[in-house]
């Protein structure tokens, strides 16, 4: 079948990849027909020449390393169209005033989720937060700039053992600054800011914007509090002289 051939091309299976590679296994497990069609479309548009590695497998999405038709490295986040996280995704989207119509169909709901992450990345960039540059999204597939060189950049969590107190202090004030700037200037909150969603690549890069939302969202203060608490507690454990997060929270919401 044509589609299958196209997907094999994207996965590079025809040349060198073995059919028992991790990439093939994950692709086989999570690429349903919609995902294959979407990848094939992006392939035809030159946005994805090839996927050659799995960066991460998660409950909600898998992230692949790839390259576009011009040879630029890309990270491709492929949301599962079937996810056990349906309820949570629905609740988060339902609270977001930017989302007009909520599809009942899980697959279509995931498309809305994907589009929202793309928009969040674009929005975050405007407020001088370093994030992977979003390239394109379609259906459940989000293509973005690859952060790293051969290997993907490490997460803060991966390298924390090699960091010094002054590194933690710098990161702490940068991340609190990000939270503040997003909230005050961008009317926005990340909602899942932690040592797992910060890559270190010549400075911090904040990733995973799927939960991010706007201040008008009725859950935004709760999400803001969560970000402040997670960041503060993490850096307190690393010996940073942190500011009380509840004081910070009040400062931010009472203006
Ligand atoms: P999840 O919802 O599964 O946590 P993330 O967006 O956090 O999804 O991505 C999962 C992992 O993939 C990250 O922890 C990071 O290691 C890697 N990753 C995500 N985006 C990129 C990127 N643009 N460049 C390099 N690695 C990335
Ligand atoms: Mn993440």
Image (cartoon, rainbow, N blue to C red):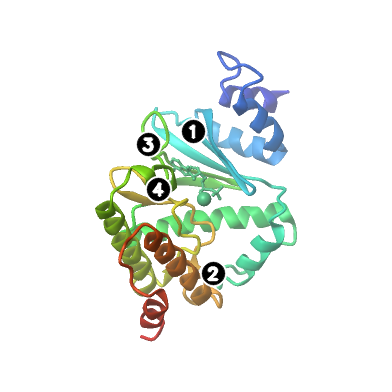
Mark closer to the chain start, 4 or 3: 3
Residue hosting label 3: 148
* Label 3 beta carbon within 8 A of ligand 1: yes
Given this view, does label 2 or label 1 mark the residue nearer the observer? 1
Q: Position of residue 115 (x, y in %)?
A: 55, 55
Side of 63 relative to 73 (left or right) = right
Q: Label 1, on which residue?
A: 65
The label nearer to you, 1 versus 4, is 4
Q: Counting residues from the N terminus, which is met first, the one under dot 1 or under dot 4?
A: 1
Q: Are marks 3 and 2 in contact (CB under 8 Å)?
A: no
The disc placed on residue 139 is none
Q: State the residue in front, 200 or 232.
A: 232
Q: Is mark 1 within 8 Å of ligand 1?
A: yes
**Mark 4 vs 2, N-terminal side:** 2
Q: Secondary structure at mark 3?
A: loop
Residue 244 is situated, as x and y percent measured from the top left of the image, at 37, 75
Q: Which residue is mark 4?
A: 156
> What distance separates the C-alpha of mark 4 from that of mark 2?
31 Å
Residue 157 or residue 58, whichever sits in front: 157
Taking the view exactly as shown, the residue that stands out farthest to the left is 166
Which mark is first along the chain, 1 or 2? 1
Rendered residue at 42%/36% (across/down): 152
Residue at mark 2: 98
Image point (45%, 69%), residue name: 229
Mark 2 and ligand 1: say if the CB distance to the nearest ligand atom is below 8 Å: no
Where's the N terminus, which quadrant?
A: top right
Q: Nearer the viewer, mark 3 or mark 1?
A: 3
Q: Secondary structure at mark 4?
A: helix
């Amino acid at each position: 079948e044509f589609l299958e051939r196209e997907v094999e091309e994207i996965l590079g299976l025809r040349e060198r990849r073995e059919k028992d590679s991790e990439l093939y296994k994950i692709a086989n497990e999570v690429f349903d027909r919609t995902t294959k069609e979407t990848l094939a479309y992006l392939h035809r548009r030159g946005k994805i020449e090839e996927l050659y590695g799995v960066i991460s497998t998660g409950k909600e999405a898998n992230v692949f390393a790839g390259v576009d038709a011009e040879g630029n490295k890309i990270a491709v986040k492929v949301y599962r169209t079937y996810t056990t996280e349906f309820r949570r995704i629905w609740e988060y989207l339902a609270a977001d005033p930017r989302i007009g119509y909520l599809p009942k169909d899980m697959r279509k709901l995931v498309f809305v989720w994907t589009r929202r992450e793309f928009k969040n990345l674009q929005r975050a960039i405007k407020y001088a937060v370093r994030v992977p540059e979003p390239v394109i999204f379609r259906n459940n597939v989000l293509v973005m700039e690859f952060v790293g060189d051969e290997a993907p950049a490490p997460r803060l969590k991966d390298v924390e053992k090699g960091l010094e107190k002054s590194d933690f202090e710098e990161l702490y004030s940068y991340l609190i600054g990000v939270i503040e700037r997003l909230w005050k200037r961008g009317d926005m909150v990340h909602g899942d800011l932690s040592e797992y969603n910060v890559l270190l690549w010549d400075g911090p890069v904040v990733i995973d914007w799927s939960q991010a939302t706007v201040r008008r969202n009725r859950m935004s203060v709760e999400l803001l509090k969560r970000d402040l608490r997670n960041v503060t507690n993490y850096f307190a454990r690393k010996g940073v002289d942190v500011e009380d997060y509840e004081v910070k929270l009040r400062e931010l919401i009472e203006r």
